[in-house]
């Protein structure tokens, strides 16, 4: 009986410690990232990689003879966000990043949820990356699976959102301006792999 009480007390203390640490990290992480991002000495201008599109071949009379996909085997025709049906946008946001228009590049709750799910399953079964982080990964930093890349991805996601808001939103940038976010979402929708060699 004494052993069981000690075990329960130990488990309770460990759960409390994990809860306090998780809460502290969740509260502090956005502020630390904002602080470090604001005080970086190399405020690089982030430029997303241009997306390659398929090419069309016409004869001398202007008749379409065929199409060629780019060297990366990506079959893509870019569209403006305004041309994408709201149901598609809503479905992508629901599946990939439901809080896309609320966060500033990273979502601590999603990261915590993913860590919890992965610990429960014993494997990486869920990701916590935002759409902005996925854009940064695919266009700027690459897909290596190491901690330093994930940290750089998080910092660059915050910086990309800041720069896109400065570029697309009128000065001073209003908190309800969506144009910077819309540009990131448009890039994502045009770059994501949809299967069968089709992108976007």
Image: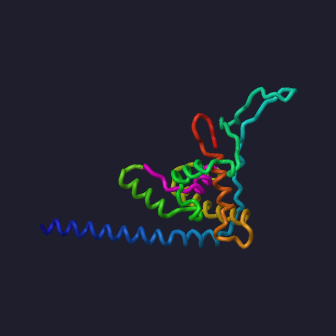
Residue 132 appears at what percent x and percent y? 60, 57
58 vs 15, left or right, is right
Q: Magenta part of the protein: which range?
A: 124-138
Q: Nearer the viewer, residue 109 or 41?
A: 109
Residue 130 appears at what percent x and percent y? 55, 57
Q: Nearer the viewer, residue 14 or 56?
A: 56
In the figure, residue 53 lies in which quadrant? top right
| Residue 53 magenta-highlighted | no
**Furthest residue to the left?**
1
The residue that appears at 22% across and 67% down in the rendered structure is 8
| For residue 3, above or below residue 134 | below
Q: Nearer the viewer, residue 31 or 44?
A: 31
| Residue 137 magenta-highlighted | yes
Which quarter of the image is occupied by the C terminus?
Answer: top right
The residue that appears at 65% across and 69% down in the rendered structure is 40
**Furthest residue to the right?**
60
25 vs 36, left or right, is left
């Amino acid at each position: 009986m004494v052993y069981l009480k000690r075990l329960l007390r130990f488990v309770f203390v460990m759960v409390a410690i994990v809860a306090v640490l998780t809460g502290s990290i969740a509260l502090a992480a956005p502020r630390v990232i904002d602080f470090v991002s604001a005080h970086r000495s190399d405020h690089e201008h982030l430029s997303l990689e241009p997306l390659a599109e398929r090419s069309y071949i016409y004869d001398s009379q202007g008749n379409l003879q065929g199409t060629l996909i780019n060297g990366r085997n990506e079959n893509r025709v870019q569209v403006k966000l305004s041309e994408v049906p709201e149901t598609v946008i809503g479905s992508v946001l629901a599946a990939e990043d439901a809080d896309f228009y609320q966060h500033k590049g990273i979502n601590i709750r999603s990261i915590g949820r993913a860590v919890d799910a992965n610990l429960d399953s014993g494997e990486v079964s869920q990701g916590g990356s935002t759409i902005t982080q996925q854009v940064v990964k695919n266009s700027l930093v690459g897909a290596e699976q190491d901690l330093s890349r994930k940290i750089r991805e998080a910092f660059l996601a915050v910086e990309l959102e800041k720069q896109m808001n400065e570029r697309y939103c009128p000065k001073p940038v209003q908190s309800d301006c969506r144009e910077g976010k819309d540009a990131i979402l448009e890039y994502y929708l045009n770059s994501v792999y949809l299967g069968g060699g089709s992108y976007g």
